[in-house]
Amino acid sequence: MASVKTYSLKGKATKETVALPSQFETPYRPDVIKRAVLAVQSRRYQPHGVDELAGKRNTAQSWQTGHGKSRMPRIKGSGTGAANKAGFAPGTIGGRVAHPPESRKVIVERINTKENRLAIRSAIAASANPEFVKARGHKIDNVPQIPLVVSDKLESLSSTKDTFEALVFLGLGDDLDRARNGRSIRAGKGKMRGRKMKTPKSLLIVVGEDSGITKAARNLPGVDITEVHGLNAELLAPGTHPGRLVVWTKSAIDRLEKENLFV
């Protein structure tokens, strides 16, 4: 197993080293990672459908043959302009939709447990590859090492200011700036539906135990925080693209190995 240095909150390497567990040696499987991410995303979909009587609340009925007109349904009492008054015929002006969305449709994608665990392990290994991290667009020129393992003191930070300063000391300021400056107004009607802004994904903080870091870091644009047992494929590979910039605490690495997570 490869060993990496542990860094303090001041960005200085300590004398302590950590052996990376076997999860970091998993082969790269982008196909499995993509399936796992889509499975996570599908659980957030909102089922929706149309009214079963939409486009059918009328007296439309076909005249059948013998009138010199097409056999589309026509509103009773009117014979002209029938194309604008079609009732049950899909694909005509004023008609119903041919194949409308239905709320009964199965929209949750399933994935096998072993396959999901493989995806998480593979995404963990990809996050330790600097080439994959750069390919996602992260700024890591000033980051001392990938994967970055820091002191457990990070878990107990309680203010956003202290957290931001610690991340800057660790060389992550450029990536935080990239996420903050990349915030933009969403195109389309999503602006009216509670998701006006788009924010690029920045780093992911993985801790062994949350002692206040979640509240301290949640206001930093693009930053996600999770305990190590709560990792999933989407956190490690947002948008199905592996190689997220991850900050591990020493206790998170220890729990990953001792509890044999995702194996």
Image (spheres, grey):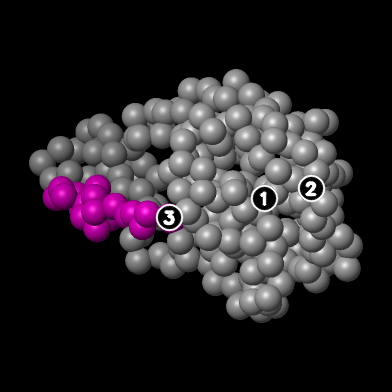
Q: Helix, strand or loop at disc 2?
A: strand
Q: Which residue is at 62% across, 53% downward? A: 152
Residue extending farthest left: 77
Residue highlighted by disc 3:
45
Amino acid under label 2? Answer: Thr
Q: Which residue is nearer to you in this view: 131 or 161?
A: 161
Q: Is residue 51 magenta?
A: yes
Q: In this picture, is 251 found above or below 138?
A: below
Q: Which residue is at 44% across, 67% downward? A: 106
Q: Is residue 27 magenta?
A: no
Residue 110 appears in the figure: yes
**Image quadrant for the C terminus?**
bottom right
- Residue contact between numbered discs 2 and 3, judged by CB atoms under 8 Å: no
Q: Which residue is at 64% across, 24% downward? A: 177
Q: Which residue is nearer to you in this view: 188 or 141?
A: 141
Precedes in sequence: disc 1 or disc 2: 2
Question: On the picture, is 209 further left or further right than 102?
Answer: right
Amino acid under label 1? Answer: Ser
Amino acid under label 3? Answer: Tyr
Residue highlighted by disc 2:
14
Residue extending farthest front: 15
As measured in the structure, the alpha-carbon distance from the residue carrying label 2 to the one carrying label 3 is: 45 Å
Residue highlighted by disc 1:
151
The residue range painted magenta reads 44-65
